[in-house]
Amino acid sequence: MNARPGRGLSGKRGTEESSAANGVRLRRVNRWLAEDMREDLAELYAECCATPPSEAFRSRSRLDFLSRLSGATRRPGFALVIAETMDLAGCAFGFPVRSDDFWWHGFDGALPRSVEQLTDSGSVFAISQLLVRPRAQESEVAHRLQERILADHQASLGVTLVAQDDGPALEALRSWGWQDLGEIWRLAGPTVFRVLVLPVGERTNRRLEGLARHTWTRWPG
């Protein structure tokens, strides 16, 4: 995932709208409209990169993003929430983590029992991408996006993966309330990712209390 403090919209409406706050409106978009918005979302991703991209980097990053989006849309329960003003301001998309899939395979060490129980109960939602265009209310928009997509699925725990060397994304997510849980191995892309979790509600916070405390010192500088 790339959590990025960060073009135009297709003009089609999603399945539901929320009231606007500070001029930013959140809107759910189904998988068919997500396909229509592929290029807009890819452009947002490229613009949210930490460094000004060369044309070669922009092209490669767009392809990587579109591949990630395509994979996510094929997952059961796929969801996309966009933030918009007159233009696209941000987005978050992902899917539920089911107890019978392989999402947690490759986790370094024993998966905490509380996380395992939440997965078994269908209460975990993986956010594949969280993007926010750079602006004054960046943190507010990020919080609203992640809260909305998790609330829509009645999730008790959000999870995401971040490349080990992606310091800006790690720092942004930490400032938005995410906690580091450990490492996970994946065959594609960077071999090792950081696993970050976002508890929803005091009850889940209590269940996860202390799990990630020691891992903060392992963040890349």
Image (tube, rainbow, N blue to C red):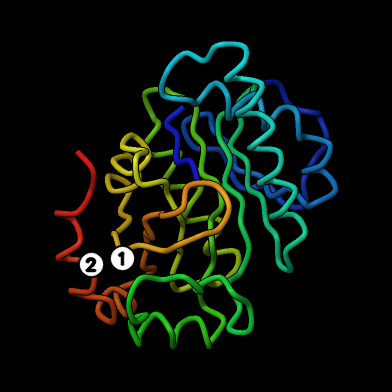
Q: What's the residue at 23%, 74% (across, down)?
A: 211
Q: Is residue 153 left or right of residue 215?
A: right
The amino acid on which the numbered mark 1 sits, given as a three-letter code, is: Leu
Identify residue for label 1: 181
Q: Which mark is residue 24?
A: none
Position of residue 54 measured from the top left corner of the image (x, y, whole percent) = 55, 11
19 displayed left or right of 72: left
Q: Earlier in the sequence, mark 2 or mark 1?
A: 1
Crowd band around label 2 with a 10 angstrom C-alpha radius: few (<14), some (14–19), many (20+):
some
Q: Residue, x 75% and y 48% (percent of image)?
A: 70
Instruction: Give the residue pinned by disc 2.
Output: 212
The quadrant in which the C terminus is found is: top left
Q: Does 171 sit left or right of 77 as displayed?
A: left
Q: Secondary structure at mark 2?
A: loop
* Real-space Cα separation, disc 2 to disc 1, in angstroms: 5 Å
Name the residue nearer the viewer: 180 or 136.
180
Q: Residue at x 70, y 60 (%)?
A: 78
Instruction: Answer few, some or many: residues within 10 Å of disc 1's Cα (few below 14, many 20 plus, some between 14 and 19).
Output: many
Residue 110's place in the image compared with 75, above or below, is below
Q: Amino acid at mark 2?
A: Ala
2 and 1 marks in contact (CB < 8 Å): yes
Callout 1: helix, strand or loop?
strand
Q: Quadrant of residue 24?
A: top right
